[in-house]
Image: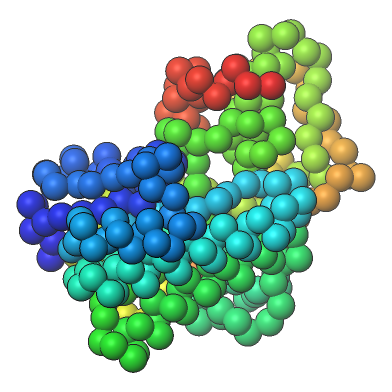
Amino acid sequence: MMEKNAKIYVAGHRGMVGSAIVRELQRQGYTNIITRTHKELDLTDQVAVQKFFETEKPEYVFLAAAKVGGIVANSEALADFMYDNMMLEMNVIHSAWQNGCKKLEFLGSSCIYPKFAPQPMPESCLLTSSLEETNEAYALAKISGLKYCEYLNRQYGTDYISVMPTNLYGPNDNYHPTHSHVLPALIRRFHEAKEEGKEYVTCWGDGSPLREFLYVDDLANLCVFLMNNYSGNETVNAGTGKELTIKELTELVAKVIGYEGEIRWDPTKPNGTPRKLLDVSKATKLGWTYSTELEEGIRLSYEDFLSNPMRAER
C-alpha cells in the first residue's frame, strides 16, 4: 500500500487520464504528488528523464503520458505516434527501475488487442493475431511498454503493473474537430449544431459498431486501487463490461445536449472495428467496479466542455 506521504510521480498530469489520477490521489489524501509539464520535462528526452529521476527519486509512478488521437490523427501520423510513445514510455520505465522506484503503473489502451479478438476481450488474447491497421503504430508502442514492465518483473523482480482502459471520456478531454475521439467529437458537433440551429447532423459510418465507454474518474479510482491491491505480469482491463452502438451513443449525446434536429449517417466513411468490449471479470474479482453511468458521465462531460478553452479552437 502507498503511504499517504509517499512520493508519487504522475506522468502526463495535464492530460485527461493524468489529471483524473491527480484528482483521485488528492481525494484519497495523498499529499506528496510531483508533476512536470511538457515544457519542464520532455519525456522523449532520455537524458532529461534520467536527471529528473536521479534528482526526485519518486517511490511510485503512474505513467499516463502519451501521444494520443482519434482515427484521423492515428492513421496520418503513424511514425510520430510510434516514436513519441515508445521513447517516452521506455525512458520513464527504465529510469524508474534504475532509481529504485517501488512500483510503477503503465497505462495502455484497448487497441493493443487483436482486430478480431474474442468478445469480450480477455487480457490473455494479447498478441494472438494481427492488430487494427489504423492504430497499429500506437498499439505496438503500448504493447512494448506493457511488455517492458513484464520483462523487468521477470528479470529483476520489480513490481511494475499495467492497466488497459476501454474508450475514456470526461473532464479535460480533447474536443478538437478532427483530432478527438468519438464521444468528445459528438459532444462538440451536437453543441455547435444546436447553437447554429442546424436541421441535421451527419455522422461517419452507419452507426452499427459497438463501443464501451468508461468515465475517466472511474478509471483513476481503479488506477489507485490497482497500485495498492494488484501485482502481476498480465495487464488488467479497465471498463464497464457494457456496450452500446455508435447510433445509440449519438442519440444519447444529442439528448443530453438538447439537440432536436435529424441525425444522418454517411456509410461511405469508415466505421472502425465492429466491436471492442473488454472482459472486466479480472478487475471485478479483485473487488472493483465502475460507478458512473454513461448518461450521467456525458452530462458531466458536457458541463466540462462548456467551460473548456479548447472549444474556441476551429
**Going by the image, does 69 lie left or right of 150?**
right
Quadrant into which the N terminus falls: bottom left
**Residue 290 visible from this viewpoint:** no
At x 27% / y 39%, what residue is drawn?
23
Q: In the rendered view, would you say 199 is above or below 122?
A: above
**84 or 306: which is nearer to us?**
84
**What is the x, y in percent for residue 59?**
18, 63
Measured along the vertical axis of the image, is residue 187 above or below residue 137? above
Could you say which is closer to the camera, residue 92 or residue 231? 92
Check the image and name the residue furthest to the right: 268
Going 29% across and 74% down the picture, which residue do you hit?
Answer: 97
Q: Is residue 300 left or right of residue 208?
A: left
Residue 31 shown left or right of residue 146 in the figure:
left
Q: Residue 73, image x and y in percent?
A: 70, 47
Count of labels in the image: 0
Q: In this view, does 37 lie above or below 282?
A: above
Q: Position of residue 215 (x, y in %)?
A: 43, 43
Q: Which of 217 and 178 is in front in this view?
A: 178
Residue 312: quadrant of the picture:
top right
Q: Which residue is drawn at 50% across and 36% down?
A: 173
* Location of residue 61 by image quarter: bottom left
Residue drawn 30% across the image and 59% down it: 51
Quarter holding the C terminus is top right
Question: Outermost residue toward the bottom?
Answer: 155
Residue 124 in view:
yes
- Residue 281: image location, x then y, percent: 40, 70
- The colour scheme used here is rainbow
